[in-house]
Amino acid sequence: MIFYREKQLQKKAFKILFPILLVFFNSIILNPISALTEKQEELISINDIQPGMKGIGKTVFSGIKIEEFAVEVIDIIQGSEVSYPYILVKLSGDRIDNNGGISAGMSGSPVYFEGKLAGAISHAWELSQHNLCLITPIHVMLTLFDYIDQGKQDRTSNPVIEDSTVSISMPFTGIFKKDLLDLMTHQTADDPSLKNNHQLIIDFQKIQTPLLANGFKGRAGEYVKNTLRRFGINLIQNISEYQDNDKELNISQTTQKVQPGSAIGVQLSMGDVSVMGIGTATYCQDNYVLAFGHPFLHHGSVSYLFSAVYIYHSFPNIVMPFKIGSAYQLLGEVIQDRNAGILARVNKFPGIVSCKITVNDLDQNIKKNSGVKVVPQKEIVQSIVPALLMQSMDNTLDRIGQGTANIKFGFRNAHTGEILYYENVFFSENDIAIEASRDLNTLFDLLYYNFCEKIDLNEITIEVAIQEQNRSAFIKEAKLNAKDYYPGDSLEAQITITPFRLADEQKVANIKLPEDISAGSAVLIVRGGSSQEQVSEKTISQDKQDYLLKDWSGIETYLEKKEKNNQIIVELILFNENEKTDLSERAEKDNPKDDLKVILDSDFVVDGYHEIFLNIKNKNENETE
């Protein structure tokens, strides 16, 4: 557990050291060297590894210096209970002891026996003293290269994360029993259930990749934590307060040397808010790097930012110590995220979704801008962008509470350059920041999950203008100019709305009845765009095929017609048996109900719901009368 005083000391130390580190980093960046080590690693087969063998591991404990630690083989774990053989080892050395054992962030640390690479540290036993771990064999990790020529495949649904636990059964007798008792915590060793068993079931968990967050505060941070938690990764607030907000991706920048043991980062976003996972490089070949020895988010073919990382410190923790650090140079792109680890390609960079947000507090005359660049994974975009929008509004308003917000969205198509615009108005008595964010995920769903066309975004713009004033109104009354109508008549609805603490306003809606309309009963529905009134399928036209929109232009047309909160919707619903009510049948007739629907704009967020029943008579009835 990190205590408050320790946090403060770390922040002060960082503020003192950061200018020095910045000069150091700039000197590295200005002196180009090759991206990868030129020496090809020699590999050792798992069949040549025996219990008792001693070797070394490599990782970064602080800064960018690669250091070694001692490794001893306990056994080779194989059988039906594991996907492939693992090497069970014990780590030792001053650096391991001083840091409290294996740290989250050591995933991928290469281990060598007889000077040859055996694999990567990947799983740890949390009930031990943090020095027992499993090694994923390098020959298993090399299978990630098989995916390079297969191309990226779209994922149309959320990934299913496999069990991150490797359970092994070990004999709890003799010398091995004594060795395990020495390595286990006192609480575990005193467990009476162990004393009568000859087998010990040990659950090794994959070493959690610390997902470090910079820039997120308060409830925005909680939002990101909750949405990313489904990936099995915990978010940790980084101590670094430095953010280079204006820095653009520079793909011509010469990358730094990456070698086995280097600290590397997998970035999901960068800018005013950043999210990054820290690990260790295991193996380098040509322009590719293998790392982690276990999945990051387990998304298969991916496109994440791959960076060089400076490690500040390894913090102690009850469950497992963890490293914290900051990315100081972009290296390339993570292209595979599989069970055996991640595969990155240097000097080639991913497409990025750039998001720019402007929030204008009209009452205080304060305008603030924020921005983030997010990897083009829809789940990540849908987590980070709404959180930044919420935080941007909270930071500008410096309060949580009532407000009316006008919000404008722009989404740029990465392939065509077309921009789709959408605008809406919101009011909330309690929390305008939450209310104004409601449309965003719906828009993401339409764009990312529609069935007919894959849509990639490369830019999102959001403009929000907020005032504390209550700009809501309620539909007070709706009247018709008659009760009975005939085909061809004009139906006139007189609508009274009452704005909050302002004088009533009058609105008029006219609907022209078709000449071929059938006689029968009907109802005129008058409702506000923000009304939550629940009505049946037969009383209001609803499009249940939002995600079957054919293409970008189909989504654009849909959003142009989409009802807004500041509108008054007036719609005539027919109940006679001659009229088709099935939605699919209505579509065949180009939705004739559009002719019986009028939308009126207003300056308020409108609520309220009214129904007026009327009759439509045959023309011969009129002549008879």
Image: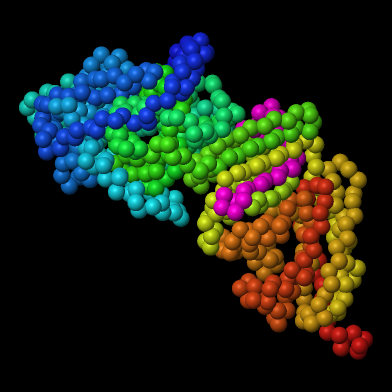
**Quarter of the image with the C terminus in it:** bottom right
The answer to whether 596 appears left or right of 22 in the picture is: right
From this view, report whether residue 311 is shown above or below residue 468.
above
Q: Residue at x 14, y 27 (%)?
A: 114
- Left or right of residue 214, residue 399 in this image: right
Q: Viewer-proximal residue, 532 or 420?
A: 420
Q: Position of residue 226 (x, y in %)?
A: 49, 38
Q: Quadrant of residue 494?
A: bottom right
530 with respect to 22 (left or right): right
Q: Residue furthest left?
A: 174
* Residue appearing at x 41%, y 54% in the figure: 153
Question: Which color scheme did the rendering employ for the protein?
Answer: rainbow
Tally of numbered discs: 0
Relative depth, front residue between 120 and 435 = 120
Quarter of the image where the N terminus is located: top left
Position of 343 relative to 99 (above/below) = below
Please indicate whether residue 590 sits to the left or right of residue 516 in the image.
left
Note whether residue 218 is visible: no
Above or below, comparing residue 544 to residue 439 in the picture: below
**Magenta stretch encompasses residue 187:** no
User: What residue is at 54 percent from the left and 21 percent from the top?
Assistant: 242
**20 up-or-down from 535: above or below:** above
In percent of the image, x 46 and y 34: which residue is there? 267
Across and down, in percent, residue 510 comes to 86, 66
User: Residue 593's x, y, as percent?
Assistant: 73, 71
Whether residue 142 is visible here, answered yes or no, is yes
Q: Position of residue 338 (x, y in %)?
A: 33, 44
Residue 406 sits inside the magenta stretch: yes
User: What segment carries the magenta color?
Assistant: 391-417
Give 254 or 466, whichever is nearer the viewer. 254
